[in-house]
Image: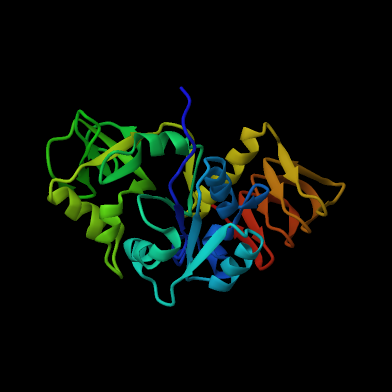
Amino acid sequence: MWLSPCVLPAMVLAAGLGTRLRPLTERLAKPLVPVGDRPALAHVLDRLRAAGAPRLVVNVHHHAAQLRAFATSHPDLAVSEETALLGTAGGVAHARALLGPGDALLWNADILADLDVRALVAAHRAAATLVVQPLAAGQGSVGLDGRGRVVRLRRERFADEVSGGEFLGIYVVSEALRARMPQPGGMVEDVLVPALARGEAVDAFFFDGPWHDIGTLAAYLAANLAWLAAREAGAWVAVGAEVAPGVALEESIVGEGARVEGSGVVRGCVVWPGARAVAPLQGAVVTPDGVVPAT
């Protein structure tokens, strides 16, 4: 079935502190940590562009200067800067003028998913439509009725559920719901839960494809290894990187300008651009500041 291009503005929520991903986020904003050949944020933007999103907005706070610099090479990306953290709902409210009127597609910057964005937009008919990985009843962050509508969100239950699911942090919200977003405020506790309590419809868009939440070190490393596996590559070395002759790379990524020295196997590692790693090494992220074990 042919699907029309995405006609909704899209906002990537990228202002958080990235505390679970420390110490990586002490050096870089979480949306800018490299996954494969480019920053995580670039992967999300590429998917939104491919779907035809007419406007792209990113909100920034932590390491705001880094994200503003990133945006200079992406002229279609508008930046909504928050001098104080406003929360997920507050950030969207703050970016109202940049997003423009109408419904909007929202995407948490630490989520990577092979999602059909156009299908999500085409399915949207409710106050909000959440992308949900289906699970058994009682499992995950949401509960659903037989029509695929959300009846449980976190600990709040509004009707009997027949299945559960994990909310991925990708969703479409209506213009009416956007108009009620507080500043500051959280999307779940201050917007979606009250909407459900009022009897408004919040639908699930089921997604059972690959996705990654790069919020922790282990999950971040797994996302990089999945990027390699999707390309059926045992390793990837960027242009300008150097790997010593005595080093064997296995399931590892070496960024631009990085060096891998020593002798032996480097397995399951991500070496950031400009970093120096010494073999043998396993299960680690190497930044210019040093080695960070991922397990």
Near-viewer residue (73 or 275): 73
Q: Across the whole image, how many numbered discs are drawn on residues? A: 0
Asked if residue 252 can be seen in this view, the reply is: yes
Residue furthest right as drawn: 245
Near-viewer residue (291 or 99): 99
Tell me which residue sits at (57%, 41%) in the image.
50
Query: On the image, which quarter does residue 34 sit in?
Result: bottom right
Instruction: Classify 122 as above or below 272.
Output: above
Query: Residue 196 placed where, x, y %?
Result: 17, 48
Residue furthest front as drawn: 101
Compared across the picture, whether 43 is left or right of 90 comes to right
Query: On the image, which quarter does residue 271 sit in?
Result: bottom right
Near-viewer residue (65 or 71): 71
Residue furthest top as drawn: 1
Query: Residue 99 placed where, x, y %?
Result: 43, 59
Instruction: Classify 265 as above or below 209.
Output: below
Figure coloring: rainbow
Tell me which residue sits at (47%, 61%) in the image.
14
Tell me which residue sits at (50%, 51%) in the image.
214
Instruction: Classify 186 as above or below 170.
Output: below
Asked if residue 221 can be seen in this view, the reply is: no
Query: Residue 157 placed where, x, y %?
Result: 15, 45
Tell me which residue sits at (52%, 54%) in the image.
217
Compared across the picture, whether 120 is left or right of 69 comes to left
Query: Residue 239 placed where, x, y %?
Result: 81, 50
